[in-house]
Amino acid sequence: MFGFEISILVIVLFALAMVFAGVKMVPQGHCWTIERFGRYTRSLTPGLHLIIPIIDKVGMKQNMMEQVLDVPPQEVISSDNAMVTTDAVCFFQILDASKASYEVNDLPRAMRNLVMTNIRAVLGAMELDEMLSNRDVINSKLLGKVDEATDPWGVKVTRIEIRDISPPQDLVDSMANQMKAERDKRAAILVAEGQREAAIKVAEGEKQAEILRAEGDKQAAILEAEARERAALAEARATKVVSEAISEGDPQAINYFVAQKYTDALQSIGAGENSKVVLMPLEASNIIGSVGGIAELLKETRGSK
C-alpha cells in the first residue's frame, strides 16, 4: 500500500513537471523558434504557449526590437590614396525569426563584417574631399547595399551612420593650410574688387566733374560770344551813324573816332601798375572839343529821327 501511494505521487509530480515544461511564456518584443526532434516547426509570438515536452523544444530566442550594432574603427584608402580611419553604427531589426535563426550563423558578427566590407568598398571609390563633404550620400549607399544583402536573413537595416572619418594628422595640417590659403585668396580678391570699385567711382566722379566744367566753359564762351556780338553790333551802328554824318559833310563826325582812340589810350596809360605820374600832352584840351562834337552829332541824329 505504501509503495502504491509513492508510485501515484511520482506519476503526479512527473505530470506536473511535463505540464510546466510544456508551458512557455514569450516576453514582448521577442520571438522563439520551436524545434521538433531538431527540426524547425513554428515560431512563438509574445504571450503564453503550450508545447509538447520532450518532443518539442525552444530552438532560438530572437529579439524582434530594433537593435544597434557598433562597427569598430578601420582604415580605408580613398581613390586619391589618402588613408583615413572611420567607424560607423548600424541599426537593424529582425523581421523573420526563422530566417535570422537558421539562414545565418552568428547574425551580429556576420552583419558587422558585412558593414565593414561595404564601408571599404564605398569609401574606397571616393576621393577624400568627397568623403568629408558627402556623409548623407555615403550613408545612403551603405544602407542600400547592406539592406539588400541582409534581406535573405530576415533582417531589415533601418539606418547606417558614419560616425567619424579621421584623416592622418599631417593630412589635417595640410588641409588647414590649404583652407587658410583659400581664405587669404578670397580676402585678397575682395580687397582688389573694393579698390577697383573705388577707382571706378573716383573716375566716374572726375568724368562728371569734367563734363560739368566743360559745359560751364561752353556756356561762358557762348555768353562771351553773345556779348562780343552785341558790342560789335553797337560799334557797327555807331560807325554807320558816323559814316552817314561824314558823307553828309559834317566834319564833327571825324572827331568821334579820334576821341574814342584817344580816350582808350589814356585809360591804358592810367591802368598801368607802375604808373605813378601821368604826363598829359598839350593837345589833351582838344579832347573836350571832340567830345562836344560827339554830343552835337548825337543831338542831330536824334533830331533827324
Image (cartoon, rainbow, N blue to C red):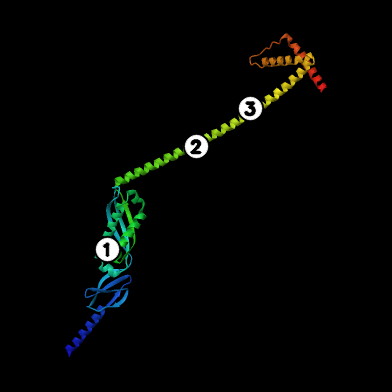
Percent position of residue 187, x then y: 42, 41
Determine contact: label 1, label 3, CB under 8 Å. no
> Which residue is more in the foreground, 259 or 288?
259
How far apart marks 1 and 2 lie (CA) works out to 67 Å
Identified by mark 2, the residue type is Ala
Mark 1 secondary-structure assignment = helix
Q: Is residue 122 left or right of residue 278?
A: left
Give the number of the disc on residue 221: 3
Residue under label 1:
108
Q: What separation in Å lies between label 2 and label 3 (alpha carbons)? A: 34 Å
Disc 1 residue crowd, few under 14, some 14–19, many 20+, Cα 10 Å:
some
SS category of the residue bearing label 3: helix
SS state under label 2: helix
Q: Residue furthest front?
A: 247
Mark 2 or 3, closer to the camera: 3
Q: Name the image quarter holding the C terminus.
A: top right
Task: Specify which label sits upstream in the sequence, 2 or 3.
Answer: 2
- Residue beneath disc 2: 198
